[in-house]
Image (cartoon, rainbow, N blue to C red):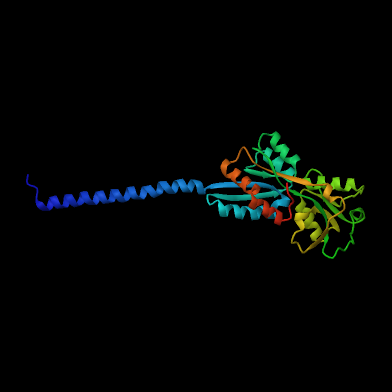
């Protein structure tokens, strides 16, 4: 059978076209493979469980951390009383990092073999907080016994510290309410629902709805804050990277600017 010249040309063109398409396909597959790798890095997320007093500072830390760690996203910062968070973690909450306002509640997580290597990163002390204008005329720690006062529950760090501070000063206070975290105490005082409360020095920073003063003996009751990546972290290296950032010079300076003391 004779094959015409036109047929040969059509066949050659088909071969060339097929090769070109094949080249395009393999060229398209390569970026897909690269994207998959970078996408995997980009999908690394970290969920942080942090004491309520760390809410503002950790929000800022998270922003700076993400800016210098493009492959990692802080997906969520859950804040509450440290005892509440420790219980949730032990019961299986999906946390990658835990930052407690005291060593006692971190120990709960350590005892459950869920903390990798806790390290102290900050400290905090108490202040007496009153509504703006100080309607209850609170001037000393002793005044808390004769006005409407709100405190933290004894189980949470701010409550344990408050009880220690009052006991050292031999001041007996019957609180109008006991709150599960320091933020709730501050909110009640700011709203005028109480004449006074005890919160951390960091909590009143920049809040123009309240006034505060450092009571005598506050420097003798210091809360030290530990932080740890958790054994169940979905991305262990990413979780540890955030912990390392908190402990870094940059992280420590930010905490200092937010009124936290050194560990």
Between 80 and 118, the residue placed more toward the observer is 118
Residue at point 67% right, 51% down? Answer: 252
Residue 212 vertical placement versus 262 (above, below): below
- Residue 218 x %, y %: 84, 50
Residue 101 vertical placement versus 212 (above, below): above
- Residue 214 x %, y %: 84, 55
- Residue 43 x %, y %: 52, 48
Q: Is residue 235 visible?
A: no
- Residue 4 x %, y %: 9, 50
Residue farthest to the front? 249
Residue at point 75% right, 59% down? Answer: 205
Q: Considering the image in quadrants, where does the N terminus appear?
A: top left
Between 14 and 132, the residue placed more toward the observer is 132
Q: Is residue 4 visible?
A: yes
Between 125 and 208, the residue placed more toward the observer is 125
Residue 35 vertical placement versus 192 (above, below): above
Residue farthest to the bottom? 133
Can you tell which quarter of the image residue 187 is in?
A: bottom right
């Amino acid at each position: 059978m004779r094959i015409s010249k036109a047929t040969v040309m059509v066949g050659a063109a088909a071969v060339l076209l097929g090769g070109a398409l094949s080249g395009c396909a393999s060229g398209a597959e390569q970026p897909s493979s690269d994207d998959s790798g970078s996408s995997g890095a980009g999908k690394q997320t970290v969920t942080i469980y942090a004491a309520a007093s760390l809410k503002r500072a950790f929000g800022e830390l998270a922003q700076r951390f993400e800016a210098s760690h493009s492959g990692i996203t802080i997906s969520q910062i859950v804040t509450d009383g440290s005892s509440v968070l420790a219980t949730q973690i032990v019961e299986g909450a999906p946390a990658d990092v835990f930052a407690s306002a005291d060593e006692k509640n971190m120990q709960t997580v350590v005892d459950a073999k869920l903390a990798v290597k806790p390290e102290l990163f900050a400290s905090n002390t108490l202040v007496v907080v009153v509504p703006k204008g100080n309607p209850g005329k609170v001037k000393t720690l002793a005044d808390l016994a004769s006005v409407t006062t709100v405190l933290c529950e004894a189980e949470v760090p701010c409550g344990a510290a408050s009880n220690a501070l009052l006991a050292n000063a031999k001041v007996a206070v019957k609180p109008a309410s006991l709150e599960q975290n320091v933020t709730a105490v501050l909110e009640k005082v700011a709203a005028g629902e109480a004449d006074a409360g005890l919160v951390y020095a960091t909590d009143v920073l920049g809040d123009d709805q309240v006034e505060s003063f450092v009571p005598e003996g506050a420097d003798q009751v210091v809360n030290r804050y530990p932080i740890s990546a958790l054994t169940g972290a979905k991305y262990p290296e990413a979780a540890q990277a955030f912990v390392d950032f908190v402990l870094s010079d940059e992280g420590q300076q930010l905490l200092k600017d937010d009124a936290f003391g050194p560990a």
